[in-house]
Image (cartoon, rainbow, N blue to C red):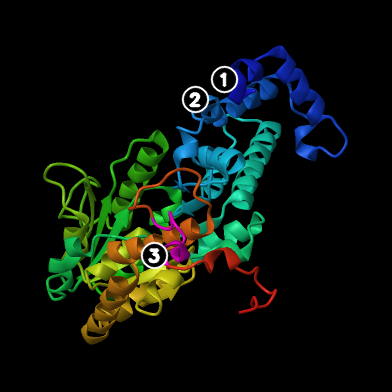
Amino acid sequence: LAREGGGLPGALRSDEAVRVLEAACRAPGARRGAAGAGLRDHLALAEELERTLRPLSLDWYGEDALGAADLCHAAGGGPVALPGLLAARFHGTPLLVTEYGVRLRAHYLAADGTERSGALRTLLAALHGRLTAEIYRQAALLTPGDTHARRWYERCGADRARIRTVHPGMPAERYAEAGENEESGDPATLVWIGRVEPAKDLIGLLHAFAEIRARQPGARLRIVAAPVREPEAEAYLLHCKGLAAHLFPDEAADPHAVGENPVSFEELGGPEAPTPEDVHASGAVTVLSSVAEGFPTTLVEAMFCARATVSTDVGAVVEVIGGTGLVVPPRNPRALADACLALLRDPGRRHRLGAAARARALELFTVEQNLAAFRGIYLELLSRAPVRHRAGADVPFAHPAEAHVPGSWAPQAVTAGTGAPDA
């Protein structure tokens, strides 16, 4: 319907679409949670379905549009991959899907239920789950950024043979100055940097730091947050500042003060704000206290800066640091405090771990390794796909290699496994 006239939005916003959705929710075999969906839920689902499938109604079905592509590379597994599905279906174009943050996982985490009924959440989960599974099934190759995301792929039915881990690439030169001067940081300062949200468990970090402070009074904690836009995040940040003032009441009466309380709160992004590399370089140890995490970009930044790290065992943390930092269980402030104190009190160990971390980051997480990996993947996929249009000399595999060999042996090519032709 979308291909023939772009009529998908009108069809999905019609009374007939709502009646079909209602019948489907009550049909035998439907999900148990969907049976209780009401009219408001059906209208909301139809709206979400139309918004999700909107790319199908664009004018790009012809040979001069998607048909002109040799390869489709989707940087996500949700609606962004729909053009790749179209190209694969109508033109046989190979589809490559790369996810550094699994979109389906983000959808589940965002479904807090504050404004949506349980039936609607069930229906939306089914919609996004089916779409994701179809994308994973049709992709010629899937390239998650870490093993944590790879497990999501396999859970959604992706074929293991078509999954290859390609780590994200980061500009190593940006962190070169800090990485080559590992003595630059304050030996008594711990650093935390990232988005402020409950999943980062700053509450647990502050309680761990209270334990650290009791056992090493000169320790300091620098919390540098990305700009807060959501009201919930702002409320959480204010709660953390209030807790810091409560835990150290004799050292600062104002929880917003910077420099008086042993815990300082700062923000990234302003004209005079510190850069991530400056933040990591200012301390001795970078801390990650999350209870849920995908690919820990903050840890990779710290590794480029040759900083030792203390992290909770969540997401892809262990895969990323690979033994170059200390790992503790999540939601365990005492273990977090013990690990931080172990590094604060042992500069030699701290520097050895930092040097090993920088070497690992330079080997695995640079832009160069990322480009080299995808260059090889592009060539591999192109080599297996037929050339459907007249290609220029700059297109890899546009002409078979035997076309450049003199003689008439090329037509005698033999199907694999049938044996060689007679001389």
Quarter occupied by residue 48: top right
Evaluate if marks 1 and 2 touch, with contact meaning CB atoms under 8 Å apart: yes
Q: Which mark is residue 6?
A: 1
* Residue sitting nearer the eye, 223 or 256: 223
Residue kind at label 1, given as amino acid type: Gly
Quarter occupied by residue 27: top right
**Quadrant of image for the N terminus:** top right
Evaluate if marks 2 and 3 touch, with contact meaning CB atoms under 8 Å apart: no
Give the residue furthest to the top: 15
Label 3 sits on a secondary structure element that is helix
Pointer 3: what residue? 373
* Residue sitting nearer the eye, 377 or 120: 377
Label 1 sits on a secondary structure element that is loop
Q: Position of residue 9 (x, y in %)?
A: 59, 19
> Dominant secondary structure of the magenta stretch?
loop
Calculate the distance from the C-alpha at mark 1 to the C-alpha at mark 3: 38 Å
Residue 333 in view: no
Pointer 2: what residue? 59
Asked if 422 appears above or below 134 in the picture, the reply is: below
Instruction: Kindly identify the residue that appears in the image at 39 percent across and 34 percent down.
Output: 231
Asked if 291 appears above or below 212 in the picture, the reply is: above
- Drawn side of residue 344 relative to residue 337, left or right: left
Along the polypeptide, which appears first: circle 2 or circle 3? Answer: 2
Residue kind at label 2, given as amino acid type: Asp
Calculate the distance from the C-alpha at mark 2 to the C-alpha at mark 3: 32 Å
Asked if 375 appears above or below 265 in the picture, the reply is: below
Range of residues picked out in magenta? 396-405
